Amino acid sequence: MTTTPDLFAPAHIGAIPVANRIAMAPLTRARAGMDGVHTPLAVDYYRQRATAGLIITEATNISRQGRGYAYTPGIYTPEHVTAWKAVTDAVHQAGGHIVLQLWHVGRISHTSLQEGGAAPVAPSALQAGGETYVEGGFAQPSPPRALETAEIAGIIDDYRNAARNAKAAGFDGVEVHSANNYLLEQFIRDSTNHRTDRYGGSVENRTRLTVEVAQAVAEIWGSDRVGVRLSPITQAAGNTPLDSDPNGTYGFLAERLGELNLAYLHCVEGQTRGPNGAQNFDFQALRRKFGGGYIANNGYDRDLAARTIAEGRADMVAFGRPFIANPDLVHRLKTGAPLAQAPQEAFYGGGAKGYTDWPSAA
């Protein structure tokens, strides 16, 4: 197998230098404490994967209200900042670059994870399907309540505060998680947004919150260190119905985000569970409408990634599950070494086993 220099050549994504075009996709691993504070295991985990051109961290809660899964990390207390600072220091010492993915789950939560047993919040009081992860196992998401218009400014402030904390923790930038049917995407889709105020109804109104969050975060970081993640045709989490016009809705949003001169758009190309279905959406049209850096994600192998970069259809390609069992994934892709496979029981929760104990090919 021959190497393809383009995939492994250094570049920039926005203002962030990258050693190669391979990104580590955000991977929820549920190894933090219930207080959202990472243990030292996370330092080892991210350091081991620092040869990725860019690490995008696991989704990280911007507030207690934003939390929807047990043992996921936060970025809203001084303790969170201290724990993440140890991670970023380790990645930088190993020569890597890392951005923090900012997360509010919206309706994909459970009262046991909310302060005082409060109901989760959402654009509209519509029950989510599927399951979420709570202490002791899985449970159906709790019925949400609809956010009042006056509350939305506070949520934008939570994103702004999380962005400040990410800077204090030493990250190279942030990614706004507006995908996978969490809060921001719940506003985008007309299947989950039945509002009649300035955040509902028209496509401009439904995409308003994602744009305002990106603007708020860019005030802290500068636009060229902010990315946004989208997933136009993914129904997980929550068994969420698609928008009635995915190409039109997400194309409009991509144009608006492009006007902000952000570092990149990171797209989940297709379904994350079941048949991929990427052929049902024009992701290259979305990339062109955005007009800036583009990270492709979902179902890529080495050859497809190399062709995608060589043909100019993406600036980086993100790999997810392969990074779980292959901390040296970049080396393995470059040399053609075989990839290890992680069992699903290693994905979420637990300690070092299945997390930091995977050997390198060497």
Image: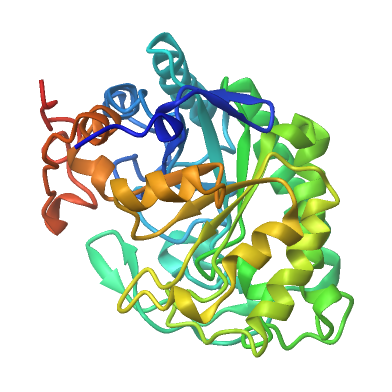
Residue 26 can be seen, yes or no: no
Decide which of 208, 94 is in the foreground and name it. 94
- Residue at 64% x, 80% y: name it: 246
Decide which of 1, 286 is in the foreground and name it. 1
- Residue at 65% x, 90% y: name it: 244
Decide which of 2, 346 is in the foreground and name it. 2
- Which quadrant of the rendered structure holds the N terminus? top left
Question: Where residue 348 sits in the image (x, y, percent)?
Answer: 24, 52
Q: In this view, does 171 lie to the left or right of 187?
A: left
Question: Where residue 330 sits in the image (x, y, percent)?
Answer: 30, 31
Where 13 falls versus 321 (above or below)?
Answer: above
Where 159 falls versus 279 (above or below)?
Answer: above
Where 340 falls versus 127 (above or below)?
Answer: above
The residue furthest top is 93
Question: Where residue 309 sits in the image (x, y, percent)?
Answer: 48, 44
Decide which of 66, 213 is in the foreground and name it. 213
- Residue at 52% x, 76% y: name it: 233
Numbered disc total: 0
- Residue at 41% x, 22% y: name it: 87
Query: Quarter of the image holding residue 90?
Result: top left
Query: Quarter of the image holding residue 73?
Result: top left
Question: Where residue 264 sits in the image (x, y, percent)?
Answer: 65, 44
The residue furthest right is 198
- Which quadrant of the rendered structure holds the C terminus? top left
